[in-house]
Amino acid sequence: VFITPRPPLFREWSNRFYFVVSLCFYMLLVSCSQTDRVPKGILSKQEMANVLTEFYLKEAKIQTLPVQPDSAQALFRYFRKKFEMKSGVPDSVVNLSFEYYLSRPADLSEIYDQVIDSLSLKEHKVGLGGR
């Protein structure tokens, strides 16, 4: 039985194929492992949902006050400064986090789902307390 050696061209293509497959597998592995990581200086989804919930509650409260729009804006700016002092979360971090999540629609959708759930729960509690 005589075995003929493979031609060098076949070995070259075979090595390239394994290299490409290995590279694709590595890229898939790395990309899947980093999906839930948030860069340093960015609020987590839960923290961002909490911040937005607080902002929407204060905004709704301010809208019920009989004040002019420019006064309402001044009140909201005051609230944001007070929120920053109370929570220790700088306004710049909130803005940067919001921009980060704007570029990730799936994450932003999850955040707003949490905000809506939170606001609905608070509304339900207020409704039950008023009866």
Image: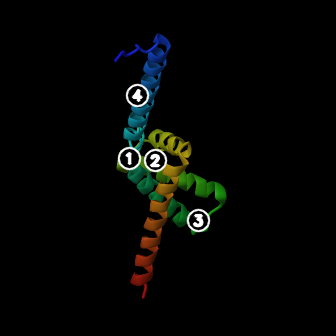
Asked if residue 14 can be seen in this view, the reply is yes
Identify residue for label 4: 22
In the image, residue 94 lies at what x, y percent?
Answer: 47, 44
The amino acid at mark 2 is Lys
In the image, residue 91 lies at what x, y percent?
Answer: 47, 43
Which of the marked residues, 3 or 2, is nearer the chain's N terminus?
3
The amino acid at mark 1 is Met
Q: Nearer the viewer, residue 87 or 43?
A: 43
Identify residue for label 2: 81
Taking the spot 44% from the left edge, 51% from the top edge, the residue there is 48
Which of the marked residues, 4 or 1, is nearer the chain's N terminus?
4
Asked if residue 55 can be seen in this view, the reply is no
Q: Quadrant of the N terminus?
A: top left
The secondary structure type at the circle numbered 2 is helix
CA gap, disc 3 and disc 1: 23 Å
Identify residue for label 3: 63
Contact, mark 4 vs mark 3 (Cβ under 8 Å): no
The secondary structure type at the circle numbered 1 is helix
Contact, mark 1 vs mark 2 (Cβ under 8 Å): yes
User: Can you tell which of label 2 and label 4 is closer to the viewer?
Assistant: 4
The secondary structure type at the circle numbered 3 is helix
Asked where in the image residue 60 lies, by quadrant, the reply is: bottom right
Badge 4: residue crowd in 10 Å (few <14, some 14–19, many ≥20): few
